[in-house]
Image (spheres, rainbow, N blue to C red):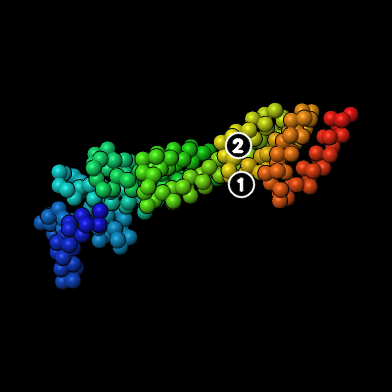
Amino acid sequence: MLMKQFRLWIPGLMVVLLFISCGKKINKEELAAESYFEYAKNLFDRGKYLDAITEFTVITLKFSGNPIVDDAQFYLGESHFKNEEYLIAVSEYQKVINDYPESIYVQECFYKIGLSFYELSQRPELDQEYTLKALRQFQIFIEAYPKSDLRSEADQRLFELRSKMARKQLLGGNVYRKMGIYDSALIYYNILLEKYYDTPSAERAMYWKAICLFKLKEYEQALTQFTVFLEKYPNSKLKGAARSKISDLQEKINN
């Protein structure tokens, strides 16, 4: 990737720098594809993303078929991403994947689509449409490129997103539990413990699941749940409450 950029950009960079150093206005109509790309890339590097979007778009239309076009298409997506226009960025990254499947940018585009949805993901109590899309995209990326340099970052994003979905389930379960609708609360806690068992929310979900079973007078199941809870989370802040419930349950079961 770096070799391609170095080979394509150096001639254009020299032309652009010459114009800039001389204080002359660039006649974009006379620029070759590589020089035009370097002009647009210079705008991008200076944080002028709206101007860069315009120029990268011109390159994709004006120099169709030129090897530089996939570079321009990728940086068109990057410009929208930097400008926090994440849905548009997704569309532009997807064009690289669809139209230039042999491009050196394809792998990064898969990752950046996931990152775009990640940035759109909302707080746990709100709609999680983009959280789910980000989860799916990062999973696709990891399956397609398991040895990628971006793998560790993707894994971290996945854990953050799964933790958010777990908090969403915990909130739902807590609402029904506080309303006294324990069987509905159990549905949420069970989903959390099945899908997001390795997230921080799993500890409280396991405890509150046991409480709901206790409230439903499923004493043997509740006893088992509290016992498993203490085995898995021996240092939990809820361990005292769990031990107290175990004593109560043993007494009820013996009677």
**Camera-nearest residue between 158 and 251:** 251
Image side of residue 226 versus residue 163, left or right: right
Where's residue 91, x and y in %? 33, 41
Image side of residue 106 versus residue 122, left or right: left
Residue at image location 46% in from the left, 47% down from the top: 155
Residue at image location 13% in from the left, 59% down from the top: 27
Residue at image location 51% in from the left, 39% down from the top: 128
Which quarter of the rendered picture does the C terminus lie within?
A: top right
**Camera-nearest residue between 248 and 177:** 248
Q: Residues within 10 Å of mark 1 (few under 14, many from 20)?
A: few
The residue where tag 1 is placed is 200
Where's residue 213, x and y in %? 74, 31
6 above or below 74? Answer: below
Where's residue 145, x and y in %? 36, 44
Where's residue 192, x and y in %? 60, 37
> What amino acid is labelled 2 in the image?
Leu
Label at residue 192 = 2
Residue 196 can be seen in this image: yes
Mark 2 or 1, nearer chain start: 2
Asked whether disc 2 touches disc 1, contact meaning CB atoms under 8 Å apart, the reply is no
Element type at mark 1:
loop
